[in-house]
Image (cartoon, rainbow, N blue to C red):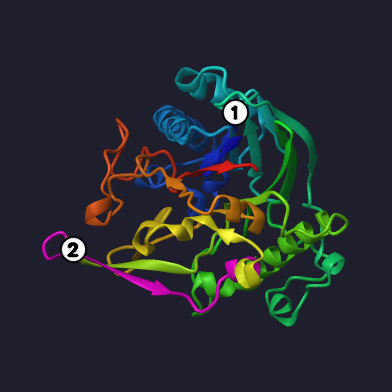
Amino acid sequence: MSVRIATFNVENLMNRFDFSGFKNNLNKDRTLQLFQIDDLEQYRQLEQARAIAHADDTRQLTALAVAETHADILCLQEVDNVGALNAFEYGYLYKMVGEGYRHKYMIEGNDSRGIDVAVLMRDETRHGEPIEFVGMTSHAHVTYNDFGIHNPELALLGIEPHERIFKRDCLEIAVRIGDKPLTLFVIHFKSMGPSRNGTDGRTSTMPVRLAEAKAVRRIVENKFSDSGGAEGKRWVICGDFNDYRERIIIGGDTLAGYTFSPVSEPVSCLDVLLDGGFCVNLVERRAVMDRWTLYHTRGPDERHLCQLDYILASPALAQSNATVLPDIIRRGQPYRTIFPPDQKVELFPRTGWDRPKASDHCPVAVTLNLV
């Protein structure tokens, strides 16, 4: 008996327009920055036209990437609401996978832009085992005080003990595959953001992600505390951690050729969950050069490949799936992504240099045997 699980940050699956760029240039699309726009009404009209013009190709590519995961259970990040999810499934996914993901689960979290995590499920696995929804729990309300994990580093960021830990949520979904219980914890941690006061964005926001990781570990431990502990149970933590333990630094150029240099990071929020064998990063079973799920660039002087998207398995699941390798679907990346030479793939039709693209992230999928 097996189930195929995927995680995918679909990058702003929205069903509303964002007009905040009229007053905040950081939110203004680069297309509109080419033009002089005199008033808010003109900006609203142009932004609506721009968003609609870009959306169709983008969501076709997103759907192609989802379809290629062949997932029975799909964990998503950056979803606006159930309405956006329904429209995406009916207008795009349905044309590729048929009546696949009938069941959709999400709860509004804490994100200021309104992007949430969600879970889509089929009625049954590809092998005919029923997928039964058991229950759903949001942990968006949990505060630093609740778990006693506020510290001076958070205080320096202006974060107070009574504030909520998760910048989105840790959405807990319990299911049964046939007669086997499985629990999913779906997350989307604090983004790195730009450099601040001479400190790079990853370092300056690290205390927030470390706290989120500690909270997830506590939630998992609490979940199974009355049934012999988490180690022997079936559970996975899926999502966009906005952090990495290693990255591939890209040097060179098209004339001289590119170089790819793996670099390990001394600190990562992932360490909180992986230390002591609490869970296993299944993607680390792939070669170090072939674990990346995102291409990051701020120009020729700052380019790297890294893993931001994870499926972390409980020790019991990892042990019973000791030879299983996850898949990373990279065909939805834009043409600007610099691939190591032996990893180049045929990109989806109509992919652009920078956009349209399926997402800035790559889906990760794995088939797990439930024994």
Q: Residue 262: x percent and y percent?
A: 35, 70
Between residues 226 and 88, which one lies in front from this camera angle?
226
> Could you tell me if residue 307 is visible in this image?
no
Image depth: mark 1 or mark 2 in front: 1
Q: Residue 160: x percent and y percent?
A: 79, 71
Label 1: few (<14), some (14–19) or many (≥20) C-alpha neighbours in 10 Å: some
> In terms of image quadrants, where is residue 272?
bottom right
- Three-letter code for the amino acid on which mark 1 is drawn: Thr
> Which comes sooner in the sequence, label 1 or label 2?
1
Q: Residue 176: x percent and y percent?
A: 73, 35
The residue pinned by badge 2 equals 253
- Three-letter code for the amino acid on which mark 2 is drawn: Asp
Image-based side of 255 in relation to 246, left or right: left
272 within the magenta span:
yes
Proximity of marks 1 and 2: CB atoms separated by less than 8 Å? no
Q: Residue at x 77, y 63 (%)?
A: 218
Q: Residue 60: x percent and y percent?
A: 42, 28
Helix, strand, or loop for circle 1? loop
Q: Residue at x 15, y 59 (%)?
A: 254
Part of the protein shown in magenta: 254-273
Is 323 above or below relative to 303? above
The residue pinned by badge 1 equals 125
Between residues 320 and 46, which one lies in front from this camera angle?
320
Helix, strand, or loop for circle 2? strand
Q: CA distance from mark 1 to mark 2?
A: 45 Å
> Could you tell me if residue 57 is visible in this image?
yes
Q: Residue at x 82, y 62 (%)?
A: 143
How many labels were placed on the picture?
2
In the rendered image, the quadrant that contains the N terminus is: top right
Question: Which numbered dot is residue 332?
Answer: none
